[in-house]
Image (spheres, rainbow, N blue to C red):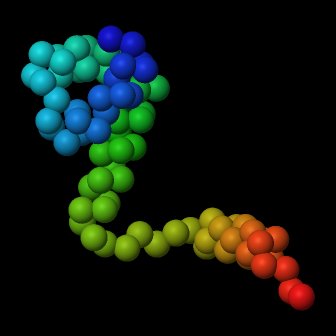
Amino acid sequence: MKCEELLTMLNEYVDGTVDPAVCEEFEKHLAGCNPCQVVVDNIRQTITLYKDGQPYAMPVKFREQMHDALRKKWKEKFPKK
């Protein structure tokens, strides 16, 4: 299995709906491919956080940078007349 094939079936794998035979190939690929391991782990963590329904406090610096970026985009899209 190649990374591209793994990525196309990623949703089914994470949901547990992929064919068991394909699942074995998936697991073999993951065992030897760190970039794909990182992608799958990030998706699992995101799903876990989402399902828990608990808010996640963003670091102050990140929140400030995000707000600045959003304000800039807003001003670009809606300049004062």
Residue 79 vs 59, above or below: the answer is below
* Residue 68 visible here: no
Residue drawn at x 35%, y 53% as measured from the top left: 46
Farthest residue, direction bottom: 81
Residue 1 lies, with reference to residue 30, above or below; the image says: above
> Going by the image, does 21 lie left or right of 2?
left
Q: Is residue 34 left or right of residue 66?
A: left
Residue 63, given in percent of the width and then of the height, sits at 61, 71
Q: In which quarter of the image is residue 9?
A: top left
At x 46% / y 26%, what residue is drawn? 35
- Residue occupying the far left of the picture: 20
Quadrant housing residue 16: top left
Counting from the top left corner in percent of width and height, residue 4 is at 43, 20
Question: Quick one: quadrant of the C terminus?
Answer: bottom right
Task: Work out whether residue 6 or residue 64 is closer to the camera in this orientation and state it.
Answer: 6
Query: Of 64 and 75, which appears nearest the observer?
Result: 75
**Residue at 36% over, 19% down:** 5
Instruction: Find the residue positioned furthest to the right.
Output: 81
Inspect this view and state whether residue 11 appears: yes
Q: Residue furthest front?
A: 81
Quarter holding the N terminus is top left
**Direction from residue 66 to residue 3 in the image, left or right:** left
The image position of residue 72, as x and y in percent, is 78, 71
Q: Is 45 placed left or right of 3 in the picture?
A: left
Q: How many labels does the image show?
A: 0
* Quarter holding residue 74: bottom right
Q: Measured from the top left, where is residue 66 in percent x and y?
A: 65, 68
